[in-house]
Structure formats: C-alpha cells, structure tokens
Image (tube, rainbow, N blue to C red):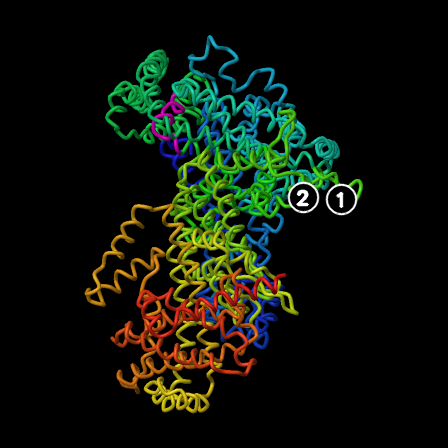
Amino acid sequence: MGKTSPSQQKLAEKLTILNDRGIGMLTRIYNIKKACGDPKAKPSYLIDKNLESAVKFIVRKFPAIETRNNNQQLAQLQKEKSEILKNLALYYFTFVDVMEFKDHVCELLNTVDACQVFFDITVNFDLTKNYLDLVVTYTNLMMLLSRIEERKAIIGLYNYAHEMTHGSSDREYPRLGQMIVDYENPLKKMMEEFVPHGKVKIYALVSLQMVYPRRNLSADQWRNAQLLSLISAPSTMLNPAQSDTMPCEYLSLDTLEKWIVFGFILCHAALSSDPAALSLWKLALQSSSCLCLFRDEVFHIHKSAEDLFVNIRGYNKRVNDIRECKESALGSMHRERRKFLRSALKELATVLADQPGLLGPKALFVFMALSFARDEIIWLLRHADNIQKKSTDDFIDKHIAELIFYMEELRAHVRKYGPVMQRYYVQYLSGFDAVVLNELVQNLSVCPEDESIIMSSFVNTMTSLSVKQVEDGEVFDFRGLRLDWFRLQAYTSVSKASLGLADHRELGKMMNTIIFHTKMVDSLVEMLVETSDLSMFCFYSRAFEKMFQQCLELPSQSRYSISFPLLCTHFMSCTHELCPEEVSHTDLESELKVRAFSCCSSAQLLPKHCAKTISQAVNKKSKKQTGKKGEPEREKPGVESMRKNRLLVTNLDKLHTALSELCFSINYVPNMMVWEHTFTPREYLTSHLEIRFTKSIVGMTMYNQATQEIAKPSELLTSVRAYMTVLQSIENYVQIDITRVFNNVLLQQTQHLDSHGEPTITSLYTNWYLETLLRQVSNGHIAYFPAMKAFVNLPTENELTFNAEEYSDISEMRSLSELLGPYGMKFLSESLMWHISSQVAELKKLVVDNVEVLTQMRTSFDKPDHMAALFKRLTCAYHVLKRMTIIGVILSFRSLAQEALRDVLSCHIPFLVSSVEDFKDHIPRETDMKVAMNVYELSSAAGLPCEIDPALVVALSSQKSENISPEEEYKIACLLMVFVAVSMPTLASNVMSQYSPAIEGHCNNIHCLAKAINQIAAALFTIHKGSIEDRLKEFLALASSSLLKIGQETDKSTTRNRESVYLLLDMIVQESPFLTMDLLESCFPYVLLRNAYHAVYKQSVSSSA
C-alpha cells in the first residue's frame, strides 16, 4: 500500500461516486419500504393466501434453503415461480446493489485507514465532508434496510423461484442472506465493524469542535453578535463577508449532528478518552431528539443510544449523560431561534431589495441566513411529527409561513441579481484570489510537480477571468477546478505526502474561500438547493396542510400563504436518477387554496327595508306609541361604516384586511414551476373567482324547487352589483383582469346552461315565470292589469306564497333584463313561444273537430237565425277562448319583458337602439317578407315591438304537419279566427268578464284576447302567405255580427257583462296595426261602444261606493 501513490488511490473520485450512489440506494430502499408498508403497493405474493404457508416457511428457515423435504408447502410456489422471478427481480437486485455498495464502502474505508488520511473540516473541507457523509449514508442505508420487515420474504421467495427454475440458487444469495442476518441490529454490527476505523474517524469528528459549537448558539447569542445584520455596522457594509472556514458557515446543522451522533455511536470509545468528543456528543444530544435517516424516516437518538450503551460494561456514565441530555433537549431554544431569524431575514431581504449590489460582498450572509432558517424549519417539521410533546408551544409555530416567505424572498433576490454577483466575484477571483494564491504557492518550501501543475492551473484559470465575459453572457463552469482541488486535498492529506496540507493550513483555508467564490459565479442554483432546499415537506404532507391551514386562519400570516405553493417548487430536487420511476409518484399537485372573503351585502339598502324606518318616523310625528317598551332600535344601513374612534376595528375591517393580505400573497409571484407544470397564482385565482362568482349568482337567486320560491330580480341585481363591487376592489391588490371574470360569468348566465352544464339564472327565472307565475294566471289566481303594467294577485281562498306584482312590475322586469341581457331575454321569449305553439296546436285540433260547422258559419254571418243554429252545433267554444286567453296572457308578459329590455338597452346603447328603431320604422310595406322578418328579428332582439312577432312566426312554423297540405293548413288558420270570433258572445255570461276601469281590463284576463288575436293572426297568415289585413277584417265582421246579436237577447244571465265584452272590439282595433276605427265603425256602431264605456264606468263607481 505504501508503494502506491496517493493519486492512484483516487480517494476523491471514489468518495464522490459512492456518496451519490449511496443517496440513490437510499431512495430505492426507501421506496421498497414504503411499497411494502402500503397494502395497495405491496408485492401481491406477500399477501397471497395460497403462498402464505410457503412465505412463513421461507422466513423461518432464512437464509437456509430446503426444497427437497417440503414439496407440499412449496407446491404453490412451483406454479408461480416465473411470475415471482419477473416481479420480484427489481426488489431482489436492489438488495444485491446494497450489498455491493457496502463492499465498496468497506474497501474505501480500509484504504483511508491504510493511507492514514488527515481529516480537518477547516482545512480539507471537501475531503472531510465527503468522508463523514459516506459513513452517515452507509449507516442510514443499513438501518433503513433493517426496517423493511418483508426483506427476508422477498429475497427468499426470489431465490426459491430461481432454484426451482434454474436448479440452483442465485450466485449472490449466500452473501446477501448472510448480510441480512448479520445486520438484524445494524448499529450493533457496525459498532464492531468500525473498531479498526476509529482512529481516523475520531480525527475527522473532533475537527468539528471548531465549527459545531459556533453553529449551535442560542438566539440571544446571535442577537448580541448582531448576526446576519447588514446595517449594524454601516461603515463596513461594503466590506466583503470573510471567514477562515467559509464553507462551514452555511453547512447544515442537521448534517453536523448526524456526523456527530452516528460517528460517536460507531466509535464510542472516544467518548471516554477525549473531552472534546464528549463535549460535541452532549451538545448534539441536547439539540435534537430525533435525526433524519432519509426523508420522513427518523432515528430517535436518546432511546437508540441508550439501548446500545446500556449493555456495554462501564458505560453507566455514558447512559446517564444520555438521560440528562434527553431531559434538557427542549424545543424552546429552536423556538427562539425561529423568532430571531424571522426578523433577521426580513431585515436582510428588505435591505437587499433596496440595494441589490450588496449581494456581492454579503453573499455569505445570504447563504448563512438561508441555511440557518432551513435547519430550524426542518427541525420543527421533523420533531412536530415524531416527538411526544411536553410543551406543544415549542412544536407549533403559527408564524412558520413568514420565515419561509423571507427565505423565498432571499432566493428570489439571488436568482434575479445573479449577474450582479457574477460580476463581483469574477473581479474578486481575478484581482485578489489569484494574486494571494500565487503568493502562497510561491512561498511553499516543497511543491511536487503534480501539485505544482494543479496549483498553477488554478492561478491561470482565475487570472484569465474578466467582467466582459459576464457582460457577453458567457457560461462559466468551474467544476473542473473544484474537482482538482478535491483531488489535491486527497493527495496532500495522506501520510508521508510530499506536500502535507496539515502543515500548510493557510493554503487549505484560502482554497476553501476560492471554491466558495467560484460557486458564486457558476453554481448559484446549486447553492440555493444546498442551503435552502425544503423538499422535505413533500414527505410530510399532513404537516404541510396543517401549517397551510393555520397560516390562512391567522390574519397576520395570510399574506405569507404563497410560501406553501412556492415550497412545491422545491420538490423537484428530492428525486434521484437511480430511481427514475419515483418522479411520476412525486409529481404532487400544488393546490393554492385561496379563500374568498365577502363583505356584508347591500341588501339592507333595498326599498322594502325602509318601510319600518318610514313607519317609525310617521308615528313619531303623530306622537303615536307603537311597539313594546324596551324594543331595540333597528340599525340603519351603513352604520357599520361609522367611526367614533379610528382605533375601533369591526369584523368587516378584519375581513377586509385579511382579503388584502391574501391578495398580496397571490400577487407575489407571476408564476412558479412545479415539475413540468407552470402554476400561475393569478390565473388560478381568476378561475376560482369565476367558479365562485357563478355559484354565488345562482345561489343568490335562493331558488327552492320544492316551494317554488325565488328572489326578486331587483334584489338579485342589487346583490350581484354589490358582489361585483367587492370583486372590483381586488384589482387594487392583485394584477388580474376582473372585467374578464365578469364577462365570462355574466355571459354564461345569459345561456340556458353554463360551461359546466349547470343551470343558470336564465333557466331558473324562465322556469319560474312559466311554471309558477303564468301557471297561476291560467288558474285564475292572478290577473294582468294593463293600467299598472303588472300582474297582480286576485283575492282567493288559497293565498299564494308570493306577490305577483313584486315580480312583474316594470322595475322588476328591467332588473330581469339587466341580469339576463338580450341573450337571456331571447331564451325567455323562445320558451314563452314554445308554450304558445303548444296552445295553438291544441286550438287547431279543436278547429279540425268543428271544421264543417265553422266553414258554414264563415259564409253565413249575415244570416242571424242560421248562425244561431250553427253555433249550437259547435263544441268546446269555452276551451277555445280559454286557450286564446292563455296565449294573450303569455304575450302580455312578453310585451312587458320586451319593453323592459328596450328601456335597459336604451340606457346602455342609446345610439344603436335608435338606429334599429329608425330602420324598423322606415321599412317599406312592399318589402319582401323574408327581408322584413330579418328586420323584425333585429328589432325584437332590441326589445322593440313589431307588427309581426318573428319569434312567434318561428315557433308556429315548426308545427307544419307533413300529412296536411299548405292549403288545408291555411284553411284551418282562417277557421281558427272564425271560431274565436263566433265564440266571443259566450264571454258575456261569465261573472268575471266585468271590465274594471281602474285596471283597464277584466279580472279573468279576457282583455288579453286583443293581443292574442292580433299576434296569432299576423303570425299564422305570414307563415301561410295570406293577407293579414283581409283575415282580420273578416274576423271583425264575424265578431261584430256575433256581439250585435247578444244586444237583442233578453236573458240577463247570458248578457250580464255584455257592455264589458263589447269593449273587446275596441281593444282589438286599438292593439292592431292592420285595423282602423273607421273599419270598426262600419261593422259595429260606435254609439254602442260609447254607451258600453259609460255603463262600465258607471257600474264601477256604484260598486266602489
């Protein structure tokens, strides 16, 4: 061994490769353990009932193999052998890889002992760190392997299947089986194994006394030293942060403690012989109660160490030390550290945001701050999940989000101002480091050729650097330089080396500083991962969610809630190339739970709520005492905004503050990368606002299908506007386009279904008006009052649950038009027309049943006696008028809706509406009907009344029957008008047909017949290309003749409301654009109409008196 040169040992290369492979093996073993612990992921052979006896037999006999005398137990195994070989190969060869890794580690440790390598963390940092890391990785791997309970079953099953298939055991099985048995208690076995390595190991560990105690100070000591503060000494603010142990300053505390704890467990003899070792050991035991083996697998220090030492003779004092340290291992020190770090990182982030140039000289402070904060967060995460808490306050930190947030701010500064740091350190390396290193090399008394070549290359590399390279965007790569320094450490740290690093400590410290400076130029991202990686949260999902929830619940912390989604960007660094299949499993969804806060609605300002206030004012004026004594005075709207003292904070103020804090959090980053996904918080917020706004609008309708209750359109409009006002205020805090949200949501609400297939307010209100309000009109419980332009409840035995006027007056219809818009109102019209078309279809059936009689009546209107005889042969005259009245009611409701739509559009788009109106009014009479219908459709969409209703024409056109010729259809349409005309006298006998001047109509809604007759006639004869005017003249002649006949009747029961029915003729002519009063005068004497009006008004006065 002595003859072999240090360079031939390749210690640096082996340490680098084995450490990386060790992490990969830990990842694979960890995944096997998790798979075996999950019933869904566990290999099926381990839970197969048919193989249960075979598995038990194999585990009992492990590692021995007996296949001859146990054919019965292993018979089932024979059937499954090929599948077992195939499916358990990955598990088995992972265990084989662990064994080979162990062999390589043991070989390297023996080489290190033989070379008597000198280790000192402050001098040959890379060599010492990699050596200590390898020991810990090896220890953790063997411990994790021993925690896989199914390891014997998996290895045994595979080997038996191999034996049955190939006639012999796998060649690795004997050694592998023995390793599994030997490492049943891994620490005990390794304590024996590390006896020969103790001397070198202790040297490495004791060198930590220069680093670990300084890294493990209390918050008060940090505070007194003004640690991490850039402004405590303004005069030195621009001086570069320097240290003799540069890389040790940001070394992970968790890593240091693992080195110490596992190192002194394996080499425990030093605890009795070396006071420095004992001091380090006790300090580590007091700092933590558990250490991380790998990810969420932990090692309980005190219990495990006590169990190991209690069986060693003469170790009573060591056991007592462990117990004493366990008692003093409290979380209060870490709690105070987190408290200090919150303020220190905030100050650091604020100063660097204002003066990013300081990132150059003070880069070390940044990475120290990140490392310290990371250590405390991971400590809390690990202990909160694994320790039986004595004091829960020490293990619950509601302000953890704030600390993570400041870490993310520092990380963002480093990423953003990387070129600033590169510029600084390129000049530092070429202008200072190269000069100092060259002097040190020149002053070396002995410098062998190999070492001299490497040193010279260092100086040359640094001297050749220039700022222009940074400005030109050149990519720097100093990995070769760092690896050469690692090799040089190995060459100069073995015993009898020509150039001993132990004798030239200044050279080692200078090179460690240079290595840090090179990382500031080419490895900033890797440095961020090294010092601030919080991917551990990926494996503590429950704790992650709990902390996130606490953050959202605490108003002062909600602005930092973005920290948790940002943590998900760290998860990419927790996988390893030796376990590529893990990437798909670890691709966790990062879900930002943005809580929407809504303020009190302005529903209190609705007109209905002022009635009580008005009543109180009137009573006060008249000095009437109403109500009970001591009744609390009702609060007026807006009282929540009144302040007698600005220090008073209402619940609304708190909610508003919480909302603004959350918005700050969402607006903090434009996007973040999580694996291959780009997550944009603002877009996420926008999409959720759309979903929430949609649900809120539909929810605010308060539609109850069982009771058919629904909010008044004006109330819903007020609520929606209030909601929109709140949402608009979000734009003050978050850079999102809230108008886009409104457009997307409100436009969807004008359709029958939204983009998710859910009902909208359009479908809800359309359904309610058709199925509830208009159905009650048909049942005679509600009447349309033209004077009020509203539907009004009639006094009945069964009172309705709603007041029709509150849903159908002009203000409510305008509110409905505002909510539904032209598209929604068009859908409402189409639904109304569908109901009308179904009524017309029934009317046509009645006409077909009476076609012969009606044909004769059409030509006999001038023969009163013959008409009377033919009328008696008619059937269902009542039903014809009833259905026509229903059509009239629907059309009256539609005219209200159209008028409201016109009013609303006239406010929003007055010039466009006036243009459409002008276009409609000036269309020539001789225009082609298709062109005219297009104009009417445009006009109808704007709410303008048309001579021919295009929606009605479309609805009735769809009724054309294939079995009936167009001529026959036209004849049925003509006879329908005849049927209505000759049936009108029957209305005079109805008690409810009395005309009321106050409402300008009849209580049984027969005044709606005027609209129905005109609209249906216009639509039918447009479809059948007949003359609307001629057909309406014919109708007027028949109706006049029939009504004049009842003037000669003597039976009072049949003529009780004769005058009221006469007025229908006047209404029909007034409503029609095709009939004139002159035409009516020629059919029906105007004196009768004048007398009829006089009679009904006189009757109305007498009845009211």
How many labels were placed on the picture? 2
Residue that numbered label 1 is attached to:
626
| Percent x, y of residue 487 | 37, 29
Q: Position of residue 960 (x, y in %)?
A: 31, 79
> In the depicted view, which residue is nearer to us: 403 or 945?
945
Q: Which residues are magenta?
A: 514-525
Does 1086 sit above or below residue 189? below
Q: Which residue is mark 2?
A: 615
Q: Position of residue 750 (x, y in %)?
A: 41, 56
Q: Earlier in the sequence, mark 1 or mark 2?
A: 2
C-alpha separation, residue under disc 1 versus residue under disc 2: 10 Å
Q: Residue 301 falls in which quadrant of the image?
A: top right
User: Which image quadrant for residue 572?
Assistant: top left
Label 1 crowd bin: few (<14), some (14–19), many (20+), radius 10 Å: few
Horizontal arrangement in the rendering, residue 905 relative to residue 150 (left or right): left
Quarter assignment of residue 710: bottom right
Prevailing SS of the magenta stretch: helix
Q: Dot 2 surroundings within 10 Å: few (below 14), some, or many (20 or more)? A: few
Q: What residue lies at 49% left-to-right and 68% top-to-bottom?
A: 161
- Mark 1: amino acid: Thr
Q: Nearer the viewer, residue 766 or 87?
A: 766
Q: Amino acid at mark 2?
A: Ser
Q: Is residue 181 above or below residue 384?
A: below
Q: Given contact means CB atoms under 8 Å apart, are the residues at marks 1 and 2 in contact?
A: yes
Name the residue nearer the viewer: 1052 or 845. 1052
